[in-house]
Structures are given as C-alpha cells and as structure tokens.
Image: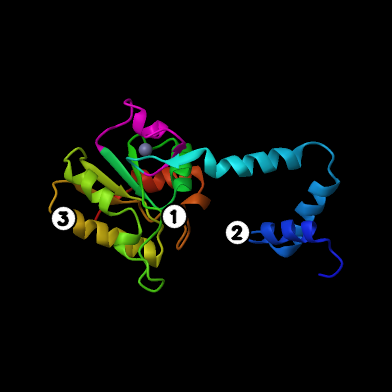
Amino acid sequence: MANIPAPVQNLIDAFSMLPGIGPRTASRLTFFLLKNNTDIAQKLSTALMNLKTETALCKECFNITLAGHDLCAICENDQRDQHELCVVETPMDVIVLEQSGGYFGKYHVLHGLLSPIEGINPEDIRLAPLFERVATGDYKEVIIATNPSMEGDATALYIRQRLEPYHVRITRLARGLPSGGELEYADQNTLLRALSGRQEM
Ligand SMILES: [Zn+2]
C-alpha cells in the first residue's frame, strides 16, 4: 500500500503475522489504535513487552508460569490428583481443559507434535521429560489429549509405544472432538464427553 507512513505500515505488518488476522483486520486495528486517545495502545505495548520477559516454562510440566518460579500453579497445587497426567500440545490446551472443569490431575505440555513431513522429531518436542516423569512410577494413568489430526495421532502412538514398559494405563480422549478439530475450539460439553469417554490405547 502506498502513502502509508512506515510506523503505521509496520504495525499493520506485525498484526498481519498473527493467526486469523488478515490485512484488512490488521489495518482496522492499527487505525483504531491510532485514533483512540485513551491508553489502549500504551497498555497493549506494556503487555506485549512483559509477555516474554515476565513468563517462563514450568520445570516439571512445561506449562507457562511466572518468571522466577520453578513450577506452575497446577504443579504446585497438592490438591490436584497426583496420579493422573494429561499430555497436551500447547499451554493453550491446558487452559481449555482447565476451563472445562472436568480434569483435576496434572499436565505435560509437549510444545509441538511429531511431524516427519515438517521434520519435527521426538527430540524437538518435550517428550524425553515426559518419559522421565512416567518412569518415576508416580502416575497411574497417562491421558493423551493431542488433537485428532495426523500429527496428533502419530504423537499419541509414539508415546504409547515408548510407555509400554511401564505399568501405567494409557488412554486417549474420545473422538467426540470435531474431526480434525482442535481442542481449543471444542465447547465445554464436547470436552467433558471426550474426557469421560476416553479410551484405552
Ligand atoms: Zn507445571
């Protein structure tokens, strides 16, 4: 686009990199911030700056926690079921499952899924620490809640194979989720059904 001053175009470009934001929405957001004379732009910029500097990954489950904390609030909470472990792809999945109100155990966040096509191998995601956690014998059940996609299924199968030597029940969320659908788009009832209908792998 011509005649747009660089600082404006830069923000439009930055918004356009976000998932689900096309060039039109990016422009709309940018011009909204430009003309808005309350402190939205200031709040947004502070929040963005702090997003990375004030957060860290939990050393046990790799969920998001506050910088300077070893553990996340869920790992620190001894009221949670200490024998159930739910394996998810992203920290966002933890939030979705927490909001469903149907799960009270602990989590393990992989930060990705296996994908031979994209060259994502077991060592590229947080699989080794998962196997270490299960090897302690602390868990009775591992619920694999990866998305019902090709990568989600491949990751689930790999985990099941690797956990074979341990005496642990391995289950997978029921196929109540929309096919190919992602956890984060499932409504509460669907999630609760998927949890309660989880099946042995
Ligand atoms: Zn944690």
Q: Position of residue 142 (x, y in %)?
A: 26, 46
Q: What separation in Å lies between label 3 and label 2 (alpha carbons)?
A: 37 Å
Position of 66 with respect to 19 (left or right) is: left
Q: Amino acid at mark 2?
A: Pro
Q: Quadrant of residue 42?
A: top right
Q: Amino acid at mark 3?
A: Glu
Q: Which residue is mark 3?
A: 164
Q: Is residue 50 magenta?
A: no
**Magenta segment:** 62-83
Q: Amino acid at mark 1?
A: Leu
Asked if the residue under mark 1 is in contact with the one under mark 2, i.e. CB atoms within 8 Å, the reply is no
Q: Quadrant of residue 159?
A: bottom left
Image quarter (top left, top right, bottom left or bottom right) of the C terminus? bottom left
Label 2 residue SS: loop
Height in image: 81 above or below 61?
A: above
Q: Nearer the viewer, residue 4 or 38?
A: 4
Give the label, 1 or 3, closer to the camera. Answer: 3
Give the label, 2 or 1, closer to the camera. Answer: 2
Give the label, 3 or 2, closer to the camera. Answer: 2
Q: Quadrant of ligand 1?
A: top left
- Identify the residue shown where x is 38% and y is 71%: 119
Q: Which residue is mark 1?
A: 177
Please, what is the dominant secondary structure of the magenta stretch? loop
Q: Which residue is mark 2?
A: 19
Residue situated furthest bottom in the rendering: 117
Q: Position of residue 179 (x, y in %)?
A: 45, 62
Q: Position of residue 72 (x, y in %)?
A: 40, 35
Q: Is mark 3 within 8 Å of ligand 1?
A: no
